[in-house]
Image (cartoon, grey):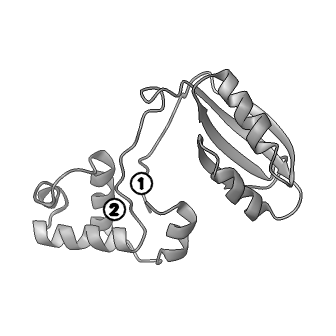
Amino acid sequence: MKNPNELREAAETIPLDDIDRRLITELQRDGRASFADLGPLIGLSAAATRQRVQRLTTSGVVQVVGVTDPLALGYPVMAALGIGVSGDVRSIADAIADIEGVIYVVLTSGSFDLLVEVLAGDSAALLGMINDEVRAINGVRSVESFIYFGIHTHRFAWAPR
């Protein structure tokens, strides 16, 4: 699967009509639904539905992926890291993204230059990741960790306009 930057660069801006929006909503509900099952829900034939899905995926508007549960995979420790950098924020973000357990890297403004979401097997592994890997990257100026006690809301589905 391509990373979000590659998808964003490859993505076209395409107009979405009401059928596209309904199709996206149905794919968010069940990304494994067959074109034959999706067609009646959006008012198209299976063949026309397949063409719509292909257009949406080729353009980068939609990705159909498997979503994992970190707890079920043995990663009970989750945290967000607020990272301050000096130097090229993109190259530092790339280096951080290569660390095992890093699942999300966002370039931002404000108190932190980067927001990073990480998973770890235990608190010692999280400390090792922060201290031995993240802080070892040239240009990382500061790291503040925010350990998750639990995930209250996690949305993958939202209605496109």
- Residue 96: tell me if it is visible: yes
The quadrant in which residue 49 appears is bottom left
The quadrant in which residue 89 appears is bottom right
Could you say which disc has been placed on residue 50 in the image? none
- Residue 147: tell me if it is visible: no
Q: Residue at 12%, 71% (x, y): give it.
A: 47
- Could you classify mark 1 by the number of other residues whose Cα lies within 10 Å: few (under 14), some (14-19), or many (20 or more)? few
Q: Considering the image in quadrants, where does the N terminus appear?
A: bottom left
- Could you classify mark 2 by the number of other residues whose Cα lies within 10 Å: few (under 14), some (14-19), or many (20 or more)? some
Relative to 126, is 42 on the left or the right?
A: left
Q: Residue at 37%, 71% (x, y): give it.
A: 16
Q: Considering the image in quadrants, where does the C terminus appear?
A: bottom left
- Disc on the earlier residue, 2 or 1: 2
Relative to 44, residue 108 above or below: above
Q: Mark 2 is on which residue type? A: Arg
Query: Where residue 24 sits in the image (x, y, percent)?
Result: 33, 58
Q: Which residue is mark 1?
A: 159
Q: Residue at 40%, 74% (x, y): give it.
A: 59
